[in-house]
Amino acid sequence: MRSNRQETPSLLKQLFPIPTGNNAWEVVCDVADKLTGDLLKFEELTQANKANISSVSRYFADSRARQLVQLLLGTERMPFVSPRTSVNLETLFPDLAAFRKVVRFVSVAMFHAAGTGRSRDCARLVNVGMRIALAPASDVLIGALVSLACQSLLVRQIAILAPLLDADDLDSIAKVLHQTGANRDRYATAFQGECKYFISIVGELNTSNLSDLAGPDDDDRRQYLEVAGNKSRLDAAKSDALDFARTELAEVLRCLANPMRYEAKVLQPQNVDARLIAGILLPGSMPSLRRVLVMLTELRMTALYCSAWAYRKRTLTWPARLDDIAPRDLCKEVVSDKALVLEKSPGFDAIRIRSEGIPAADGQQRQVITVPATPKPS
């Protein structure tokens, strides 16, 4: 008897019904499909305390796991082309979870390569992993936030593995990280796209559809209904919301062009009705900008950490200062002229690089950033 049950199409088939074979975005979706469910038991491997060199070596003894690594390495010269040409309220982003899963897989593959003495393979995986992590950054703002999470996973793994890698490969990784941190245009594109989307949605708001933004249990539903019932009040709210979005975008772009302009602050529309509209339709750009600046800081510091280890492997000593291993302008805080700090561990053959962190909002404490990360108290 023929079953009427229809199988859900794979992520690759959903987003790329006719794959080109030369789009790294397709490869990410394909690899994520192959890692889904029980295949290779990837999720089990990445649970806390499950991944050690023994378990990871057993995992990569499976030819299917090695084939996935080769698929990803094959994207080194491929472009990343998004399946989306436009975005609206109904647009879904199922592939963003795939990027996180595939970057976790790359991170485990890096661990395996470094732990089995294949330093050059680890460096190649860092390059591929960072390209994958960066791909969704300019697609939409949520893509930029997923990109930041993926980059964070990679830089933390790099800091752990650096002592195991050869000097030349550490130099190669440091170069990749510095180049990644220098290109901020992708984030500008994401913020610009989000603002453009917001402007188009607000332009379509009218007295008949504004109340649709509020759910039945929304505390602000009464205010939505009041605004929806008054055209002049709605028009004033829309105008103020649009002015606010453009002003906030301009500030974000200025800070991306020159991070030293950044100040920790929360911007809001003056009009309370405009705040209502912006609150549900416009993502918080300033908190997102702060996350970008934190990532740029960690990229710079991790690159310097790799360079310090390369210096250590070549000379058998640690550098006395950071500018012994990199140009002076790369040894400074991203958002100030202050120098990053090289700390040597007394009694241990180790170093740590410390940043005073990104400026904090009023009433909040600035969070120091270190590479390697300082363990959190249990």
Image: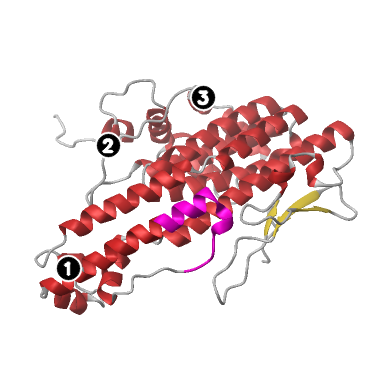
Q: Position of residue 353 (x, y in %)?
A: 74, 52
* Horizontal arrangement in the rendering, residue 78 relative to residue 11 (left or right): right
Look at label 2 and name its amino acid.
Answer: Thr
Q: Which residue is mark 1?
A: 235
- Between circles 3 and 2, the one closer to the viewer is 2
Residue assigned mark 3? 76
Q: Residue at x 20, y 65 (%)?
A: 213
Query: Foreground residue, 265 or 305?
Result: 265
Quadrant location of the C terminus in the rendered image:
bottom right
Q: Is residue 194 left or right of residue 266?
A: left
Rendering quarter of residue 124: top right
Write the start and end of the magenta stretch as one range: 250-265
Q: What's the residue type where badge 1 is placed? A: Asp
Q: Is residue 41 visible?
A: no
- The Cα atoms of the two marked residues, 3 and 2, are separated by 24 Å
Q: Is residue 299 above or below residue 166?
A: below
Residue in front for this viewpoint, 96 or 180: 180
In this view, the mark in front (1 or 2): 1
